[in-house]
Image: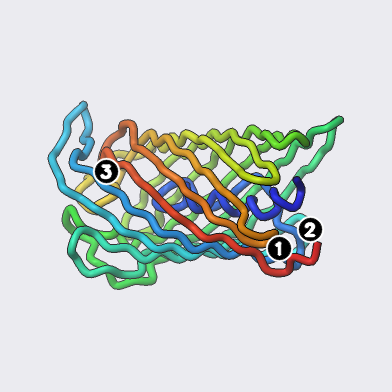
């Protein structure tokens, strides 16, 4: 069980990271181990949510390829890096915004056959591609965003877990914006498979124009539901399938997303 969950500690990136709450999970990555994940996703919508229950017709299809790396630098600390490539409709694709995170396990307390874990994490995302920032098919804003997270996870030895995380996102440029994210997740990981379900709430703390970006606009708020199913191929690698749906919000597309990923781990001496 422990070996399986060590591999799955970074799997959650594949179903939640893209344009969502970030790549921080509730599983520690041991010192000397490096997790690498490569994913493909396809997202579609034809309805865009506006404030005051308004809607707008749009035909948007987003293809994404993402790279994720997490490496354990100590028993309690890991570094996380992400890099996505995106294409909207038939427009030219580009690298989008890379991010770098520091994740620290503040508490791990066992009680009987369960463990309580608390993590804190800070991250910074920066644009790395010279992509278009205006119009309905823009990849983003070339924004610089500071992100902070507080994570709690209850893990039972039978494999099931409960997870919650929240924090704050500060967009520094091109204009100052902030939002409050909340993620709730539950799932089960065993020897032969892993599955989870999650729901995400993002609330903008300032109003925005909402004019740019295929996925979301300035001042976006949304509710998103998703799930993941994973199967190990070897002790150090596996495949996953995930899906997500935007249920509502403002300045956000009513999208559905399907993603596939390959995950492997280096330094698997145990």
Q: CA distance from mark 3 to mark 2?
A: 41 Å
Callout 2: SS: loop
Q: Residue furthest top?
A: 53
- In contact (CB < 8 Å): disc 3 and disc 1: no
Frontmost residue, 196 versus 155: 196
Would residue 3 be visible to someone looking at this image? yes
Q: Position of residue 28 (x, y in %)?
A: 71, 52
Category of crowding for the residue at label 3, using alpha-carbon neighbours closer than 10 angstroms: few (below 14), some (14–19), many (at least 20): some
Q: Residue furthest left?
A: 57
Q: Residue at x 79, y 58 (%)?
A: 75
Q: Residue at x 62, y 61 (%)?
A: 237
Which residue is under mark 3?
208
Q: Residue at x 61, y 43 (%)?
A: 194
Which residue is under mark 1?
72
Q: Residue furthest right?
A: 112
Q: Mark on residue 75? A: 2
Callout 1: SS: strand
Would residue 78 be visible to someone looking at this image? no
- In contact (CB < 8 Å): disc 2 and disc 1: yes
Q: Position of residue 133 (x, y in %)?
A: 24, 61
Q: CA distance from mark 2 to mark 1?
A: 7 Å
């Amino acid at each position: 069980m422990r070996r399986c969950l060590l591999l799955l500690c970074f799997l959650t990136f594949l179903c939640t990271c893209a344009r969502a709450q970030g790549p921080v999970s509730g599983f520690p990555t041991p010192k000397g181990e490096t997790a690498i994940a490569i994913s493909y996703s396809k997202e579609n919508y034809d309805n865009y949510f506006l404030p005051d229950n308004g809607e707008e017709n749009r035909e948007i299809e987003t293809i994404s390829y993402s790279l994720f790396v997490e490496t354990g630098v100590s028993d309690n600390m890991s570094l996380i890096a992400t890099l996505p490539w995106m294409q909207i409709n038939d427009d030219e694709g580009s690298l989008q915004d890379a991010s770098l995170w520091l994740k620290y396990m503040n508490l791990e307390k066992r009680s009987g056959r369960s463990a309580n874990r608390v993590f804190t994490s800070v991250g910074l995302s920066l644009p790395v591609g010279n992509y278009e920032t205006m119009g309905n098919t823009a990849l983003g804003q070339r924004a610089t965003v500071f992100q902070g997270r507080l994570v709690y996870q209850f893990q039972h030895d039978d494999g099931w877990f409960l997870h919650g995380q929240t924090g704050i996102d500060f967009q520094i440029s091109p204009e100052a914006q902030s939002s409050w994210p909340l993620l709730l997740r539950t799932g089960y990981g065993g020897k032969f498979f892993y599955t989870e379900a999650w729901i995400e709430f993002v609330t903008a703390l300032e109003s925005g124009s909402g004019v740019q970006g295929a996925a979301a606009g300035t001042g976006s708020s949304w509710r998103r539901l998703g799930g993941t199913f994973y199967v190990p191929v070897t002790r150090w690698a596996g495949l996953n399938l995930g899906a997500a749906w935007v249920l509502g919000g403002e300045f956000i597309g009513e999208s559905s997303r399907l993603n596939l990923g390959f995950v492997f781990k280096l330094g698997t001496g145990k």
